Image: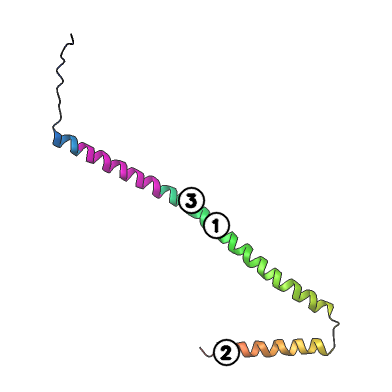
Amino acid sequence: MSDAVAVTINETIAETSTNFLATTKSAFESGIADARASVEETWPKITDAVGKGMYNSAYGLAFGVTFPILLLAKSIPQNNSIVWGFVDGAKAASKYCDRTFSKK
C-alpha cells in the first residue's frame, strides 16, 4: 500500500496572496524599467533615421526642381529679351512676396 506523508504548509492563504502580489508588482516594475531603457536607447536612432529621410526627401525635391530650371536657363542665350523678361519677372515676384508677407 502507499504510505501517507504529512505535508506542512508554512504560509497561510493571506501570506501566499501577498507574496504573489508582491512578485507580480516587482515583475511589472521590472518590465516597465526594461521597456523605458529600450525606448531611451532606440529613440535617438529613430529620430536620426527620420531626420535623414526628411533631409534626403528635401534634397531630392530641391534638386529635381532646380536642375531642370537651371538647365533650361543656361541653354537660353544671354543678353536678349527672353532673359531680360525672366530677370524682370523674378524681381517683380520677389517684391510682391516681400509686400505680401510683410503685412502680417
Residue 1 within the segment the image draws in magenta: no
Q: Are marks 3 and 1 in contact (CB under 8 Å)?
A: no
Q: Amino acid at mark 3?
A: Thr
Q: Could you say which is closer to the camera, residue 98 or residue 89?
A: 89
For the stretch drawn in magenta, what is the main secondary structure? Answer: helix
Q: Which residue is mark 3?
A: 42
Query: What is the x, y in percent for residue 5?
Result: 16, 15
N-term-proximal mark, 3 vs 1: 3
Based on the picture, tell me whether residue 26 belongs to the magenta stretch.
yes
Instruction: In the rendered structure, find residue 64 and report the number of the disc placed on it.
Output: none
Residue 104: percent from the left, percent from the top? Answer: 50, 88
The residue segment tinted magenta is: 19-36
- The quadrant in which the N terminus is found is top left
Residue 48 is tagged as 1
Percent coordinates x, y for residue 67 in the rendering: 74, 71
Pointer 2: residues within 10 angstroms few (<14), some, or many (20+)? few
